[in-house]
Image (cartoon, rainbow, N blue to C red):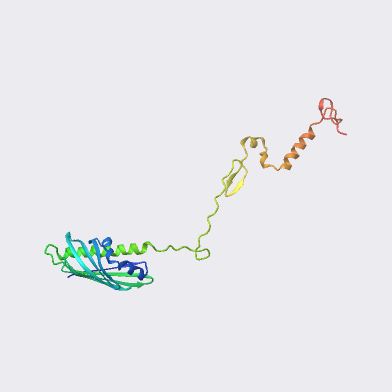
Amino acid sequence: MVKVERHRIVRAPVQKVFQLISRMDASPRVTGLWLTADLVERKPAALTVQYRGYFAGLPVESLQRATLYPPHRIDFRQTRGGLKAFRGQYLLKPVDGDTEVSLTLEAEVGIPFISDQAARLVLHAFIERSLEKFKLTAERELPRVVRRAGEGSASKPAPLPAAEPTDEETIEGGIATPPAESPASAANGQAPPAAQPPAVQKKHRRRRRRRRRSPGDPRTGPGGTPGPVH
């Protein structure tokens, strides 16, 4: 007899993993050994399945009876088939909310063309593919953890996008400032109109208007020149 045993941790409850594995008639999808499976008989705690496939390249048939011990154990054994003996067992153990799945296979091929080493490789591939497929299927529909506001590191609302600077403003360090002074204004010693308060601009205009005197003003001389000061 050739015996192979492997373990795998599945992030799912024991009941869910047991329900998945107990569908023995769906095993051709995962094992890589059996190509077809026909359900012959189903009872509350047992089922009989007819398998057809290839063992180390040779076609074989195997009628197997599985006994269910929910939710921790499944035993199966060949009752008739091309192999001299074939049996196995699933053991499910809860571990911190997850499930540790152990699969043990034993086979006696009884075919001269298939060595014990070849049989061991077939059983090893059977176990690895089965456990990996069970793990992926059981964990595929796990609910996503969504944190609510106020719980742990709850997600904060995304900040609003910053407004882009207009043609009349530039953004420096996140503070809106007026545009830089033009070279012409700097050369004349004058501040740009936008940088002066409205009151200062009006005052300058009033001063200019006061300097412009009419020719008949008694404070101006002939030709508009300033007259003598009394």
Q: Nearer the viewer, residue 41 or 82?
A: 41
Residue 32: percent from the left, percent from the top? Answer: 24, 60
Q: Is residue 114 left or right of residue 193?
A: left
Which residue is rendered at x = 35% and y = 72% of the image? 94
**Is residue 51 shown left or right of residue 92?**
left
Q: Is residue 113 left or right of residue 133?
A: left
Which quadrant would the N terminus be assigned to in this image? bottom left
The one nearer the camera, 118 or 14, is 14
What residue occupies the far bottom of the structure in this picture?
Answer: 69
Foreground of the two, 22 or 5:
22
Q: Is residue 184 left or right of residue 98?
A: right
Going by the picture, which residue comes out furthest to the right?
230
| Quadrant location, the C terminus | top right
Residue 202 position by quadrant: top right
The image shows residue 40, relative to residue 181, as above or below, that is: below
Occupied quadrant, residue 201: top right
Query: In front here: 102 or 206?
Result: 102
Q: Position of residue 167 (x, y in %)?
A: 59, 40
